[in-house]
């Protein structure tokens, strides 16, 4: 998932405009702005948007280290292994 839209208040991002709109309505009672990701990124660098003080799994964090391709592969491997085990235990395969 790539970030296309961002909540200006807490930096929550999503590839779907609707998801960020819903987030702003339900979490911030419509007291935040919906911003295109690139505009938000530039605004953060220029000081127009402050860093979020609210932790969120999709928060923009430039200091967060990216996972290596191997780490991503390893994570996905174990997730799929768990899915297959669950399906087998449920008798679905």
Image: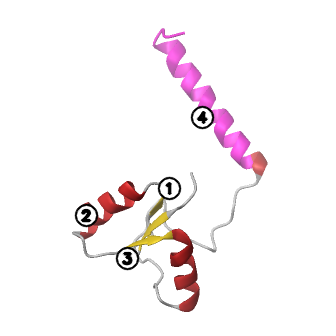
Instruction: Nearest to the eye among marks 4 and 1: give it.
Output: 1
- Percent position of residue 17, x then y: 41, 58
Disc nearest the viewer among 4 and 3: 3
Give the numbered dot on residue 25: 2
- State which tag comes first along the sequence, 3 or 1: 3
Q: Residues within 10 Å of mark 3 (few under 14, many from 20)?
A: some
Asked if marks 3 and 1 touch (Cβ < 8 Å), the reply is no
Q: Residue 3: where, in percent of width, then height?
A: 54, 61
* Magenta residues, start to end: 71-93
Mark 3 vs mark 1, foreground winner is: 1
Q: Mark 1 sits on what residue?
A: 15
| Residue 38, placed above or below residue 70 | below
Between disc 4 and disc 3, whose residue precedes?
A: 3
* Res. 8 visible in picture: yes
SS type, badge 3: loop
Front in this rendered view, residue 38 or 66: 38
Instruction: Assign a secondary structure to mark 1.
Output: loop
Q: Quadrant of the C terminus?
A: top right
86 displayed left or right of 34:
right
The figure's colour scheme reads: secondary structure
| Residue at which label 4 appears | 79
Magenta region includes residue 91? yes
Badge 3 is on which residue? 9
Q: Main secondary structure of the magenta part?
A: helix
- Residue 3 versus residue 52 in the image, above or below: above
Residue drawn at 31 percent across, 75 percent down:
32
């Amino acid at each position: 998932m790539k970030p296309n839209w961002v909540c200006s208040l807490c930096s929550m991002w999503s590839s779907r405009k609707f998801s960020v709109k819903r987030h702003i309505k339900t979490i911030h009672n419509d007291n935040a702005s919906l911003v295109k990701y690139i505009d938000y990124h530039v605004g953060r660098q220029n000081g127009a948007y402050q860093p979020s003080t609210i932790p969120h799994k999709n928060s923009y964090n430039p200091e967060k280290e990216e996972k290596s391709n191997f780490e991503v592969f390893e994570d996905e491997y174990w997730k799929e292994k768990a899915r297959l085990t669950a399906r087998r235990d449920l008798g679905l395969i």
